[in-house]
Structure formats: C-alpha cells, structure tokens
Amino acid sequence: MTTPTIELKPSSTPVSAKEREAVLASPGFGRHFTDHMVTIRWTEGRGWHDGQLVPYGPLALDPATTVLHYAQEIFEGLKAYRQPDGSVALFRPEANARRFQASARRMAMPELPVETFLDACDALVRQDIDWVPAHGGEESLYLRPFMIATEAGLGVKPANEYLFVVIASPAGAYFPGGVKPVSIWLSEDRVRAVPGGMGDAKTGGNYAASLLAQAEAAEKGCDQVAYLDAVEHKWVEELGGMNLYFVYGDKIVTPELTGSLLAGITRDSLLSVARDLGYTSEEGRVSIDQWQADTANGTLTEVFACGTAAVITPVGTVKSARGEWTQSDGAPGEVTMKLRDALLDVQRGVAADPHGWMHRL
Ligand code: PLP
Ligand code: COI
C-alpha cells in the first residue's frame, strides 16, 4: 500500500481568534468544526493518492454516488488532549486506525495504511492546534475520520473510488448534564446487530438502525438504549454509541466481543486501567435476568457506559418491559468515578502513561 503525502492548502478565511475563543468557552459536542479538513482519494488500480489539507467545507457529490444509495461508509472517533506543557497528544490513534481497517474489510472498502491515518490526524491537529481546548478541564478536540464510496452509478457492488476525510470538532461533555447518571431503556424487541452482520464495524448503517429505538427510549423518558443479542434476546450487548460495564464490588465485567458489538477502545483501555488500580476486570456474558436480579440482591453495585465521546458515564435508572430499577441509588458510583478519573488523568497528561497510549504530535 502506498502512503500519500498530504499537500497543504490553508484557508484564507479562518475563523477569527475571538469567535474561536467563544466556541471553545462552550463547545458542546459536534456542533462546531475547525478551519481545515484532510481529504485523500482512493481509485482502483492507483491506490491512495491526492492527499490534501484544505479549508473545511462542503463535498460535491454526484447524486448517483453509491454511498448515498447503498451506505458504503465507515467512520472513527478519537480525541486530542492539551497536555500540561501546552503540547497536544492523541489518545490511542493507532487503535482507531486498526479498527478503521477492520471496518473497511467488513464493508468491502480499501484499507487505509495505519501511518496514513496517523499522518492525516496529526496534520489536521497541527494545522488547527489553536482549536484544541486548554489543559485542565475535560474538553478535547474530537477527530472524526471517515470514508465514503464515491463512484457514481446505481449498480450494487463495491465502489471503485473512495474518499477518506478527517474533520475535527472541539468537544465538551457529550451529555449536556455533565457527569450525571444516564437513564437506559432496555430494548427487548428491537436489535442493533445480528450474528454475521456488521455490528462490530463502525459504519453509519448501525447508527441509522438505532435511531428509532433511541426515539422510543426518549418517549419513555430515557437517555439511551441498551441492546440485547438478536438470537436469544437475553444477553446484554451495548448501547447505541457506547459499551457497558457491570461493577461487582471490586470486579468489573464487560460483555465479550461476540461480533455484534463494537470493540470500543475505551472499553479495552478500562480492562487495563482497572487492573492498574487493583480491581479485577474481565470480559463475560451478562444476561438481562442477571442484571435485574444482581441489582436487587446488591451484588451488582454499579453500571456504567463508556466510549470516546462520552468517556465514562454512570447508568442510573434502567427501564424495561419487565420493570424499572436504579443502580447505586441513582448517584455516580465510586468505582465508576475512580476509573473515570484515572483514564482522564492519563489522557490529560497528569498521570503516568504505563501502556504508552498517548501519541504526542
Ligand atoms: N459502541 C458503539 C456502537 C460506538 O459507536 C462507540 C463509539 O465509538 C463505542 C461503543 C465506544 O467505542 P470507543 O471507546 O472506541 O469510542
Ligand atoms: C464516539 O464515541 O466516538 C462515537 O462515535 C459515539 C457516537 C458519537 C457515534
């Protein structure tokens, strides 16, 4: 695979420092974008080429472009954090690059070399470094690399042309309420993914498939949906955009990777962070019956969700057709918050990084 260089074509009309500061004072999530983006093309027979760092702006697509019809699309999400010395570091970008390759294989798309993925993220963050929020809080610069099929035509087949793009957005808290427990609607009939399907790929279709259940959750007064496996409707898998952890005293358990849930990088990191803190961590199977019964008998002490955008978010109320219950009296649990602080400390560069996760620019 060839690794294209990225040619710089800087914006002549970047956002003013004053406007940028106003955005950074309250960034929200995914509402504002930086001045530039990276684009790299792939063409059959030629491979990756034409890498550019250009002003952020609209993409022109033929109405027959296949991604608009058959959804051949994948994406990633990762964060850049301002370090105490003012430098910037990305959290585990190689892991995102490898997952992007795995998603590409599943969706019959070309694999982007890991170093090209890293070069593209680094180039964008370097160019728009003033958009990385200050050190100290939880804010970060969220990077959204994605790839779409760009061949025009209505035949159903893998496209012969693709576009890889990286955009960046300053990010505050994903849930506007800050660290307060989220309520979960446990969907026993709608499924997110099926065995042999694409649940373990980070592809737009999985999110489109989750929106109706998410709207139903909102109608029930819940923030998020938890999905069960599609065969037995029994085993807990994940939320629409986050993995789940169950805390049993000093042991944390996360649903094993069955192929129908996303291999979250936060999930993977927490298996290690928990061990570093002296907890036991494991992957296993948790059934809906167990979730309810172990909460009632007090052995399941906390539940939390985790992902790049949301970091770690405690689960408070759980509602389902079988009833409603509350985890850890609806307050953020102690283990949840210890893990959250430990992970954020590594990301913000105020704790040692024993696993070599931070990628400095
Ligand atoms: N599960 C789904 C469906 C997601 O979209 C995400 C977010 O990326 C996650 C889990 C968490 O993954 P990560 O920790 O890599 O962000
Ligand atoms: C992330 O956590 O990066 C996600 O992609 C979740 C959501 C915003 C889709």
Image: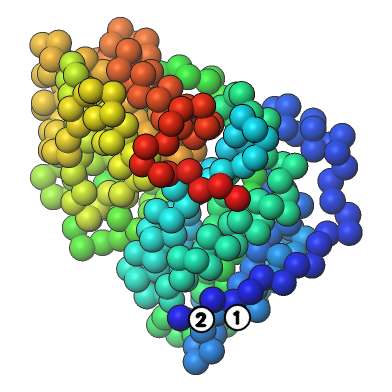
Q: Which residue is drawn at 13% across and 38% down?
A: 284
Decide: marks 1, 2 in contact (CB < 8 A)?
A: yes
Residue that label 2 marks: 2
Q: Which percent across, then down, holds residue 233? A: 15, 42
Residue lying farthest to the top in this orientation: 329
253 vs 198: above or below: above
Q: Seen in the image, is 310 located left or right of residue 194?
A: right
Q: Which amino acid does label 1 sit on?
A: His
- Which of label 1 and label 2 is nearer to you? 2
Q: Which percent across, then down, holds residue 159? A: 47, 81
Q: What element carries label 2?
A: loop
Residue that label 1 marks: 49
Disc 2 packing (10 Å; few <14; some 14–19; many ≥20): few
Instruction: Name the residue nearer the viewer: 155 or 181.
Output: 181
| Picture quadrant where residue 37 is located | bottom right
Q: Is mark 1 on a helix, strand or loop?
A: strand
Looking at the image, tell me whether mark 1 or mark 2 is earlier in sequence order: 2
Disc 1 packing (10 Å; few <14; some 14–19; many ≥20): some
Residue lying farthest to the bottom in this orientation: 45
Q: Which residue is drawn at 39% across and 66% down?
A: 101
Q: Seen in the image, is 195 located left or right of residue 170?
A: left
Q: Which percent across, then down, holds residue 44? A: 50, 88
Q: Residue at x 60, y 24 (%)?
A: 137
198 vs 333: above or below: below
Q: Seen in the image, is 62 located left or right of residue 263?
A: right
Q: Which percent across, then down, holds residue 123? A: 65, 59
